[in-house]
Image (cartoon, rainbow, N blue to C red):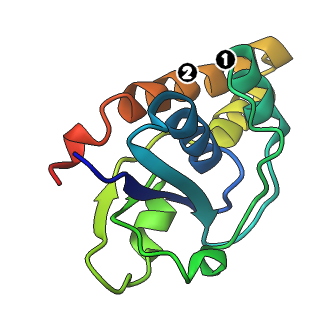
Amino acid sequence: MSAKVTILFLCTGNSCRSQMAEGWAKHLKSDVLNAYSAGIETHGLNPNAVAVMKEAGVDIFSHKSQLLSDFDDIDFDVVVTVCGHAHETCPYFPGNAKIVHVGFPDPPALAKELAAQGASEEEQLACYRTVRDEIKAYVATLPESLGL
């Protein structure tokens, strides 16, 4: 493959999963991917996502939560929806963008459920670490797994 694949990771709020995916793509695959992330809405950058990515040696602190419309001028080769809501509401992309859905669990929702059951902060962070590692494993397969 001679040209880099331009990829967008899309989630509802661009606060956690899509940010992790962008971070991993830039960290692991910057030689073959131009990676971006956006949301249908913006919810701000999740501090727990930042913390667990930093633990893994990936700094996403400078990322910001962005809207899909912030990237109207970019022709994406691939749009990966990383949550069910984004997949269900994924807008039409002009051109030849391939839309792929790879759903990952929602760490804030999982952590909230655990907190309601009396889980410690460390146990809640484990949700973020698990999803972080699942996203890393997926990103490691790119771009080959996309069948472009």
Which amino acid lies under the numbered mark 2 shown in the image of this protein? Thr
x and y percent of residue 100 in the render? 30, 58
Q: Residue at x 42, y 75 (%)?
A: 75
Q: Secondary structure at mark 1?
A: helix
- Could you tell me if the residues under marks 2 and 1 are in contact, i.e. CB atoms within 8 Å? yes
Which amino acid lies under the numbered mark 1 shown in the image of this protein? Ala
x and y percent of residue 19 in the render? 64, 46
Q: Residue at x 69, y 26 (%)?
A: 53
Q: Is residue 24 above or below residue 78?
A: above
* Residue for badge 2: 130
Q: Residue at x 82, y 57 (%)?
A: 44
Res 117 quadrant in image: top right
Res 59 quadrant in image: top right
x and y percent of residue 139 in the render? 41, 34
Q: CA distance from mark 2 to mark 1?
A: 6 Å
Outermost residue, left side: 147
Q: Where does the N terminus fall, quadrant-wise?
A: top left
* Residue for badge 1: 126
In the image, is 135 to the left or to the right of 38?
left
Q: Is residue 74 above or below residue 42?
A: below
